[in-house]
Amino acid sequence: MLEKIKQLEKTSRLLDPNPRLRTQWNEAVQAYADKFLDDIENLKTYNVEDDKGKQLLNFPIDENPKTITEILKIVEENVDLPALNPASGGHLAYIPGGGIFPTALGDYLASVTNRYAGVFFASPGAVRMENMLLRWMCKIIGFSKTSLGNLTSGGSIANLMAITTARDYMQIKSRDIENAVIYLTHQAHHSIQKAIRIAGMSEAKLSYIPVDEQFRMDASALQEAIENDKKNGLKPFLLIASAGTTDTGAIDPMDKLGVIAQRFGLWYHVDAAYGGFFVLADEVKEALKGIELADSVTIDPHKGLFLAYGTGAVLIKNVEALNNTNNYQANYMQDVIAAEDEPSPANLSPELTKHFRGMRMWLPLQLFGLQPFKAAISEKIWLCRYFYKEVQKIGFEVGPEPELSVAIYRYIPKNGDVNSFNAKIVKLVREDGRVFLSSTTIDGVFWIRLAVLCFRTHLSTIDLCLQILKEKVEFLEKARSRVYKKSTSTE
Ligand SMILES: *Cc1c(COP(=O)(O)O)cnc(C)c1O
């Protein structure tokens, strides 16, 4: 038996590389990362690649170790090349993410030490760090000192946690669901509907409140809807507002909605996954007023704080409610010391073992201080305002004045179908690849979107985007007029 154990140990020790090998791997990975970052300005934002990473399948998981050089080559060609490069400042689609460099250093440290950030007893420092970050976010949105929440993997999970907490706090049991009413608008992010379904409430009544011409929830229509539902014996229990919709960056009138929620005793959730960190910018502070009235807020550090993907947050005033939904005891946890200085994330979320997410957020905030974050947020607002003005000069029609950093616009061609003309612009821009744009359809109208949130997007990027749009429109108009002439001349 001892012989067997020793023999196994010899091989299993390979999992702990010696210093020489560590250095070799570190250097190779670092060189790869440096090359990527040194080239970032020249890399395409979107690569149309027929292969779509297929070569990965030729490198199966098997008994054989491969060299770091081989591995990085596979990654470069199959993972980091095809399709969207979200690290590029040219990413102006959907809601762009971040990728500030120290996120990687935080992840590196968190993984090397592998501190267990689930319970205070196991790593008081890690838990303190995460709770400190949550309290900082509570503070910037104007939540009370007793508020807390949880660092999640993203905004969708944060929305799900807010909705399950609201469900339990408002005592919506299975038998109540048919009569329960949730208020939102058609502009709410689809992760809300997803969360409602996952939370077992797909039979609840979703009351879609009309929006004004800026796509913001109409507060008086909300009040009317709640009154009617009450009269009809239904149970209004949850109001969901957006602080920055995905389509247009619209901000619902959060202060008015907060007052209504309070009057009728609804749980008030604000989805600020995209717009939350704009409270750091003086330019839009006013529009975000009323967010502090919420019972729960979703905010995404991997959007507005420019972290690499993987960090969202749910902030909740009633920590006991969050705890009641998520806390659970088990026999094998009996040694965990209950008396704690700080609430443990494992009691406030569905997760037990989790990535030590705090480090990837805390380290960049400490290294940079807040100033560059604030400047970057303000810069994004101004870049969007600049684009909104300039895109009209090259003949585009625009949607409402941007509230945050999203603008919608479309080109009305001389002849032919407007929607398909604009869809073609988006396709041509994607094939071009220097910048990446996405589109949406609102009430049957196809709009091209510009979303400025990548920290690498600067004035030159927006000017490039405008130049590309101009080029594509000219190209399409020429092609169309040729077709038009041809069809009229053969008549
Ligand atoms: C991005 C976004 C979400 C979803 O967040 P993920 O981090 O992608 O899971 C939810 N709501 C809004 C408004 C968003 O912009």
Image (spheres, rainbow, N blue to C red):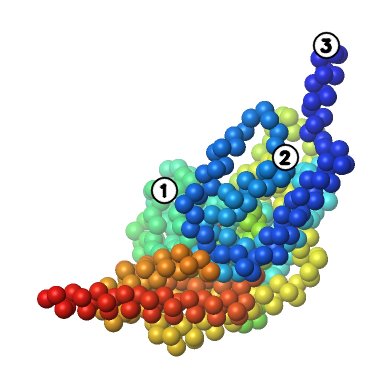
The structure residue drawn at horizontal position 37% and vertical position 68%, both measured from the top left corner, is 424
Distance CA(mark 2)–CA(mark 1): 50 Å
Q: Residue furthest bottom?
A: 393
Q: Which residue corresponds to the image point at 71% horizontal and 33% vertical from the top-left?
A: 65
User: For numbered disc 2, what is the local secondary structure?
Assistant: loop
Horizontal side, residue 68 vs residue 201: left or right: right
Q: What is the three-letter code of the residue carrying label 3?
A: Met
Q: Is mark 1 within 8 Å of ligand 1?
A: no
- Front residue (pair 235, 279): 279
**Image depth: mark 1 or mark 3 in front:** 3
Classify the position of the C terminus by image quarter.
bottom left
Q: Is residue 348 left or right of residue 226?
A: right
The numbered mark, 2 or 1, whose residue comes first in the sequence reads: 2
Q: Residue at x 50, y 49 (%)?
A: 52
Tags 1 and 3 touching, CB below 8 Å = no
User: In this rendering, which labeled residue sits more in front, label 2 or label 1?
Assistant: 2
Q: Which mark is residue 1?
A: 3
Q: Tag 2: Cα neighbours inside 10 Å, few (<14), some, or many (≥20)?
A: few
Mark 1 or mark 3, which has the lower sequence index? 3
Q: Is residue 444 left or right of residue 150?
A: left
Q: Is residue 106 above or below residue 340?
A: below
Q: Residue 111 has which mark?
A: none
Q: Nearer the viewer, mark 2 or mark 3?
A: 2
- Is residue 314 visible in the rendered image? The answer is yes
Residue 484, image x and y in percent?
Answer: 23, 77
